[in-house]
Image: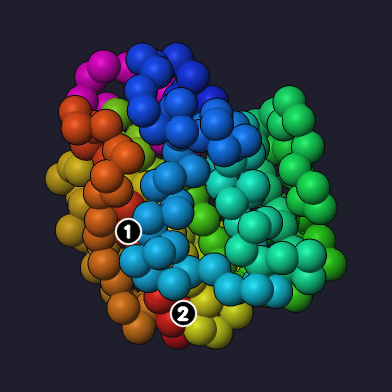
Amino acid sequence: MARSKLGDRNVRKDRFHNKAKAAGFRARAVFKLEELDRAHGLLQRGDRVLDLGCAPGSWLQYARSKVGPTGVLVGLDRGPLQKPVAGARIVVGDVMTIDVAELRGDVSAFDVVLSDMAPDTTGVRSLDQSRSEALFERALDIATQVLAPGGNFVGKLFMGPDFKKLVDAVRARFATAKTIKPASSRQISIEQYVVGKGFK
C-alpha cells in the first residue's frame, strides 16, 4: 500500500532535486528531514533511529550524518535499497504486517522513529487521504511499541478529515506535538509532517 520516497524521482526535477544530487543525497526529500531536525532537534549523536519507508535512503543518509558512527540505523521498505547506506540494517517487508520484533532486532528501543511513507496515490483525494491516515496510524503504533521514554517521532500525513484526530493521538503520547510543512514540500502537495517530542 505504501510507496517509498522513490516517488520523488518521477516528478519534475527542481532546485531541491539538483541540490540533493550535488550534495550526494539520493532524493530531495532529505531537505524535509533536515528542516524538521533543524527546527525541532530530533536527532542526536549516538541515537538509535528507525526509518519506516526508507527507500531510496536519503533520510538514512542524513540520519547517519547526525548520529555518527556510534548511532544505530534501521530502515524498513517493501524492497531492498538499490545502494546500501553505511551501517544501516535494512528490513524488507510490509509496514502493515511486519513483526515489530523484526524491526527491533537486537535494539532494545529506538530514540527516533521516522516515517515519510505515502500511499500509492490514485488521484482520488478522499481515498489517498484515507490511505495516508492508515499509514500514519500504523507508523505511530509502531513508534509507541519501540520508542524509549523521551524519544521522538516524525510522520507524514495528508491533510484529511481525520487529520486533527491523528495529531491529537500524537499529542496524547508525547510531551509536545507540532505540525509543519517544510519549504521543500511541493506547493501543491497536501502533505504535512507531525512531530512528536518526548515520548511518554
Above or below residue 119? Residue 37 is below
Give the image location of residue 124, x and y in percent: 23, 19
Asked if residue 48 is among those painted magenta in the image, a careful observer would answer no
The C terminus sits in image quarter: bottom left
Decide: few, some or many residues near mark 2? Use Cα within 10 Å; few <14, some 14-19, many ≥20: many
Number of marks in picture: 2
Dot 2: what SS?
A: strand
Q: Residue furthest front?
A: 22
Above or below residue 175? Residue 140 is above
Give the image location of residue 33, x and y in percent: 45, 52
Sequence-wise first label, 2 or 1: 1
**Which residues make up the magenta segment?**
117-127
Give the image location of residue 18, x and y in percent: 46, 26
Above or below residue 19? Residue 176 is below
Residue 88 at least partly seen: yes
Amino acid type at circle 1 is Val
Residue at 45% x, 15% y is: 10
Query: Which residue is under mark 2?
Result: 199
Residue at 36% x, 28% y is: 15
Query: Which residue is under mark 1?
Result: 194
Depth order, front residue of 42/162: 42
Query: How far apart in space, not on screen, are marks 2 and 1 (Cα)?
Result: 14 Å
Depth order, front residue of 8/133: 8
Amino acid type at circle 2 is Phe
